Amino acid sequence: MEYLVIDGYNLINAWGDVFDVTGEPLEDCRDRLLHILSNYQGYKNIKVIVVFDAHHVKCGQENQMTFDNITVVYTRENKSGDIRLP
């Protein structure tokens, strides 16, 4: 099985033509991203994991859930979702 791990907030901010982060609630952007990735996961037959980090969020709670067969991870307060390679 192939896996695709995505930094959700980075993708939302990078796709300025898809998401209006200044004009729509962040929750709506997250939901729309998950729907897009759900379709992509089904099309490519891969496992998608989306991480939304709370690196700059006070009182962020660590949580993991499933959205339409996508694993969604929310990190705890001050925890970056970035992967550091050697």
Image: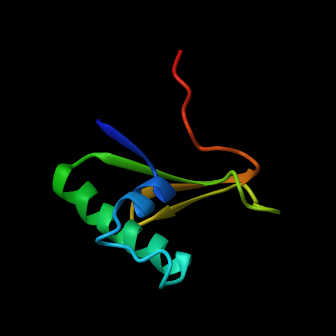
Residue under the image location 50 percent in, 61 percent down: 66
Q: State the quadrant of the N terminus.
A: top left
Question: What colour scheme does the image use?
Answer: rainbow
Q: In this view of the protein, which residue sits in the foreground, 75 or 64?
A: 75
Relative vertical location of residue 40 with respect to residue 18 in this rendering, above or below: above
Q: In the rendered picture of this protein, how many numbered marks are placed on residues?
A: 0
Q: In this view of the protein, which residue sits in the foreground, 72 or 58?
A: 58
Q: Residue at the far left: name it.
A: 43
Could you say which quadrant of the image residue 39 lies in? bottom left
Could you say which quadrant of the image residue 43 lies in? bottom left
Relative vertical location of residue 4 with respect to residue 34 in this rendering, above or below: above
Residue under the image location 35 percent in, 67 percent down: 16
Image coords of residue 44 (percent x, y): 18, 50
Q: Residue at the far right: name it.
A: 59
Q: In this view of the protein, which residue sits in the foreground, 59 or 64?
A: 59
Q: Is 56 on the left or on the right of 21, as rendered?
A: right
Relative vertical location of residue 35 with respect to residue 71 in this rendering, above or below: below
Q: Is 15 on the left or on the right of 66, as rendered?
A: left
Image coords of residue 15 (percent x, y): 34, 63
Q: Is 27 on the left or on the right of 3, as rendered?
A: right
Could you say which quadrant of the image residue 13 lies in? bottom left
Residue under the image location 54 percent in, 75 percent down: 26
Image coords of residue 20 (percent x, y): 41, 77
Image coords of residue 55 (percent x, y): 69, 51
Residue under the image location 34 percent in, 46 percent down: 47
